[in-house]
Amino acid sequence: MNILANILPFFLKEIDNFSRREIISFAYLSIEKILGFSKSDCILNSNYILSDEDISSFEKIIVDIKKNIPIQYVLGETHFYNLKFNVNSSTLIPRPETEELVRYILSHNFSSVLDIGTGSGCIAISIAKNSKASIDAIDNSKEALEIAKFNAILNSVDVNFMFNDVFGFSVTKKYDLIVSNPPYVLNSEKKYMHQNVIDYEPHNALFVEDFNPLIFYEKIALIASKNLNSNGLLFFEINEKFGEQIIDLLLKLNFVDIELKKDINGRDRIIKSVFK
Ligand SMILES: C[S@@+](CC[C@H](N)C(=O)[O-])C[C@H]1O[C@@H](n2cnc3c(N)ncnc32)[C@H](O)[C@@H]1O
């Protein structure tokens, strides 16, 4: 593997636990990360000579891919809403359905935002990049907040990241918009998930107890009822199983104009409500 043209065949020869299409995609993502070449650059530079350091970086990536570590963690980065984000095992890998949430949020008017459970900062940072709003974001993972702060710098935006636990929430400021994609996967749903999610993604970002599945929604709706301006907006990403129950709890707290939206796969995934 001493020239660029050999990388793809090398990945295909070495990796056998993914489909050909996935392996090709991993190879191009790795080339972009290590050499900075896009797919079309690869054609133009097929005879580019790899240094020993390049070769050992590719070999290390292949070892990690073979261990079933998600490619985003192997490379330490991913794309979300056309922006680059660093990720590691302390941050959830941002998902495409969350991009839909951001797209929907950005079709509204607001000038201040609080993102609860920010993780990599993907929601807060993509809103900051595409609006003029001032943005605060909290998480109870110090490690995730370090990555989120780095991602704000990477994307040249200002977000005020704060260490705060939602269950000891201590922010008194009022906002036009509060958004949260909190942990919502039931412990009993683990058996349906890909093993590499269970093995490598942070469990505190994903799972809730079956006997109390709405614990985050109840607490965040309560926070929103105190920290939203009048006519303020509350957006949730949700587990498709709990749309009706979350609507009920919002109604009890006097939220109005509640909308339940489906993602591209037809699953109930986003709830918007307004605080009067
Ligand atoms: C589903 S992840 C969402 C991450 C990111 N917002 C996204 O959409 O990709 C939930 C986030 O909530 C954070 N979290 C979990 N429990 C929390 C708590 N008690 N207080 C504050 N944040 C919490 C986790 O650290 C994680 O970053």
Image (spheres, rainbow, N blue to C red):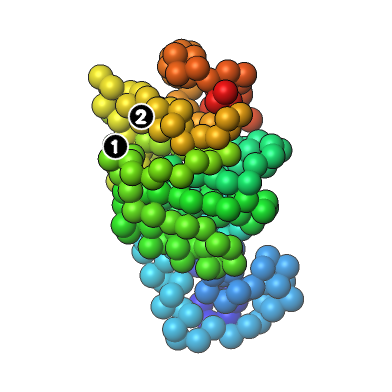
For ligand 1, tell me if the residue under mark 1 lies within 8 Å: yes
**Residue where numbered disc 1 is placed:** 167
Callout 1: few (<14), some (14-19), or many (20+) C-alpha neighbours within 10 Å? few
**Residue where numbered disc 2 is placed:** 219
Q: Is residue 165 above or below residue 13?
A: above
Residue 67 visible in the picture: no
Q: Are marks 2 and 1 in contact (CB under 8 Å)?
A: yes
Mark 2 or 1, nearer chain start: 1
For the point 58% across and 80% down, the residue is 3
Callout 2: few (<14), some (14-19), or many (20+) C-alpha neighbours within 10 Å? some
Q: Which mark is residue 255?
A: none
Q: Position of residue 190 (x, y in %)?
A: 32, 31
Mark 2 lies on a secondary structure that is helix
Q: Position of residue 159 (x, y in %)?
A: 51, 58
* Type of amino acid under label 2: Lys
Q: Which of the 4 image quarters holds residue 65?
A: bottom left
Q: Is residue 91 above or below residue 194?
A: below
* Type of amino acid under label 1: Phe
Mark 1 lies on a secondary structure that is helix
Q: Which of the 4 image quarters holds residue 267?
A: top right
Task: Report the number of numbered marks.
Answer: 2
